[in-house]
Amino acid sequence: MKRIFLLIACWALAFCAQAQIQAYTTWPYQYPDFQKGKLILSNGQERIMPINIHLLKGDLHFIDDKGVIQMAPAGQFSAVQIGEDSFRRVNGYLMQITPGPDEKNFVAVRRTIDLTALNETGGAYGTSSTTASTRRITSIDMPGMVNTSHMEIMQNKENGQKVKIKEEYFVVIDGNAVKATKKEVTEAVGADKAAAFKQFLKKNKINWKDEQSLLKLFDFLAQ
């Protein structure tokens, strides 16, 4: 029995490891390769093509029929679906969403490359402080990938430095994005409901960095 539990635990850890984003300065993407995904265009039409999320600015990249990486103009699509992952543009950024009670109420996560951590003088991801201090990375240094061969980028994807991913959580209330903190959401709820919201939080422990936990907020907002 113990062995079965051990195998399950190992499998779970392996699954979590696979789910983690493996991005590099030479591969600043959310997925390990371009995935066949669906774009919902602004006119309501749909397009299926190989796509990926560029994590520097949250742009959507796709591979054209010549095998070259291109960027999809932000104004031409309203939503993106990659496997089970859904994305929408929130506050000008392409964010991964967890659906709420309707189209105007949901949780959103913005994932970007943590340039500050990459540049910290204490040594970036295992490099010595001397190396880090003489090789600062900026957004200008990060390759844009557009108009570049997909195969060429894939062949060199792990030749750069591994990067950390910064996550920012938002609660979208009636179409307005609110940063997922107790202070920001309390202000968005309004002074007339502040006392009731305080009592709600006492009864419902909210993890402000967990999508499923943040969805509980809509139980209060629906009242």
Image: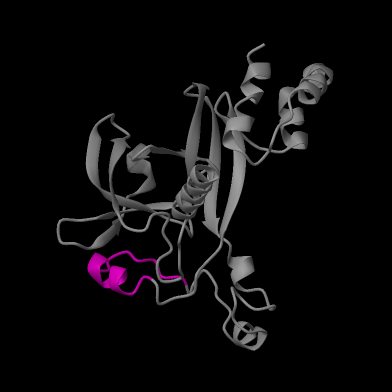
Q: How is the image coloured?
A: one colour
Viewer-side residue, 157 vs 80: 157
Q: Quadrant of residue 40?
A: top left
**Above-or-below relation of 111 to 215:** below
Q: Residue 64, position in %: x, y?
A: 20, 56
- Residue drawn where x is 65% and y is 88% of the image: 130
Viewer-side residue, 91 vs 215: 215
| Outermost residue toward the left in this view | 65
Q: Main secondary structure of the magenta part?
A: loop
| Outermost residue toward the front in this view | 1
Viewer-side residue, 85 vs 49: 85
Position of 143 compared to 106: left or right?
Answer: left
**Above-or-below relation of 3 to 64:** above
Q: Is residue 155 magenta?
A: yes
- Residue drawn where x is 82% and y is 20% of the image: 199
Q: Is residue 111 magenta?
A: no
Q: Residue 196, position in %: x, y?
A: 80, 17
User: Which span of residues is magenta-colored?
Assistant: 142-157
**Above-or-below relation of 15 to 107:** below
Q: Where is the C terminus found, in terms of image quarters?
A: top right
Q: Quadrant of residue 172?
A: top right
**Above-or-below relation of 132 to 39:** below
Q: Residue 73, position in %: x, y?
A: 34, 49
Q: Quadrant of residue 154?
A: bottom left
Q: Residue 116, position in %: x, y?
A: 63, 67
